[in-house]
Amino acid sequence: RRIAVTQLPAPAEAPTKTILRALQGEAPAVPPVWMMRQAGRYLPEYRATREKAGDFLSLCYNPDLAAEVTLQPIRRYGFDAAILFADILLLPQALGADLWFVTGEGPRLSTITSEEDFARLKPVHAIDETLSPVYETLRILRRELPAETTLIGFAGAPWTVATYMIAGRGTPDQGPAHALKTENRALFEQLLGKITEGTIEYLSRQIEAGAEVVKIFDSWAGSLQGDDFDRYATEPARLITETLKRRYPGIPVIAFPRQAGEAYTRFHQATGADCVALDDSVDAQWAAENVQIHGCVQGNLAPRHMVEGGPALVSETKRIVQAFSKGPHIFNLGHGITPEADPDNVHRMLEAIRS
Ligand code: CP3
């Protein structure tokens, strides 16, 4: 099926939004900042809206309430970016997987372990039937966000999404996905190919609805080694980035191959992503010398500092700002902020970045 691509306004010559400038390679005096999971359970106003929506998925599919929780951390902290409120597991659901969340445990999905399971998935073009409320959330946000705030859309990377679709849940070592890769590589690659196609269409619709940047979350990239990393983490990210850039020139891509370690360097070079997000196991000084030389980086304060606070929060924040100060950098955490975080520590972090 040919997808009609709506005409987008030409990208401005010199964007005024700080994040877009960093993504074009500028090194601003003060780095722009946002946080992964900035709309989340550590905020009382999020918990109140979530209560009103009922469960987490009802919140994701309610455009007014999803836009509201996206805006809450912008109002409270004035972050430079807002990230769409949704989840990486909405795409598998749109492809026909059953999805539900068990309180205190996490996501559950129907599993894909055989050709028969795979054949039951819906065609890629059917995803909009399920995901159109998400596009509506983005249209609301483009109207309601302050002019200086960048709107980020996102999807899971094919490998990470596949680990949930194969196992039917989160797994500590992604064992079931590695097992399918060994036992039935053809089926594994067919599944990855389908998720890659679905991700390209999903992110295309997000851009058409108003996302100014898209981010690809590969939370489990670190469990892929050697050739597997290049084939199943780097190559899908490269293909998604290349296709989106051809369709929507000027739309920047941030990629997050979490726990990639030394492979961050070749990932940044090979994917063509405008920015790679660093997890907090990466040394900032090493990353400045080996990864940031290939383009913008994002990160990478350990989320525990938002729980613990104290002098370490301030000194670590300043150390990271300093380490990346010679090149393009977007300040962020190395992973999502946790429900136990103290909302006041976010103010302390912002103070340390901006002072
Ligand atoms: O960052 C944001 O504020 C935007 C929204 C967002 C959510 N999930 C909301 C969410 C984003 C970008 C995600 C990405 C996501 N979802 C990832 C990749 C990033 C990462 O954390 O590694 C993954 C692996 C998922 C899958 C997922 N969603 C899990 C494993 C869980 C359960 C764990 C948990 O924290 O409860 C979720 C639920 C989820 N997604 C919540 C939120 C705010 C908590 C839901 C609640 O309100 O109870």
Image (cartoon, grey):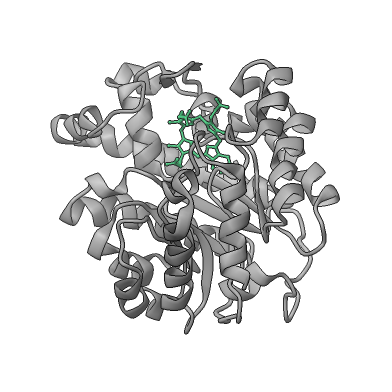
Could you tell me residue 239's position as x and y percent? 43, 57
Front residue of 52/179: it is: 52
Could you tell me residue 126's position as x and y percent? 60, 29
Residue placed at 69% from the left, 19% from the top? 51
Could you tell me residue 100's position as x and y percent? 50, 16
| Residue furthest to the front | 311
- Residue 159 in sight: yes
| Residue furthest to the right | 143
Q: Is residue 129 left or right of residue 288?
A: right
Q: Is residue 199 left or right of residue 218?
A: right
Q: Quadrant of the N terminus?
A: top right
Residue placed at 63% from the left, 40% from the top? 39
Figure quadrant of residue 353:
bottom right
Front residue of 259/340: it is: 340
Q: Quadrant of the C terminus?
A: bottom right
| Residue furthest to the left | 183
| Residue 130 vertical placement versus 23 (above, below) | above
- Residue 99 in sight: no
The mark total stands at: 0
Figure quadrant of residue 165:
top left
Q: Is residue 59 left or right of residue 292?
A: right
Front residue of 72/154: it is: 72
| Residue 354 vertical placement versus 86 (above, below) | below
Q: Is residue 41 left or right of residue 255?
A: right
Residue placed at 35% from the left, 27% from the top? 170
Residue placed at 56% from the left, 81% from the top? 27
Could you tell me residue 208's position as x and y percent? 71, 51
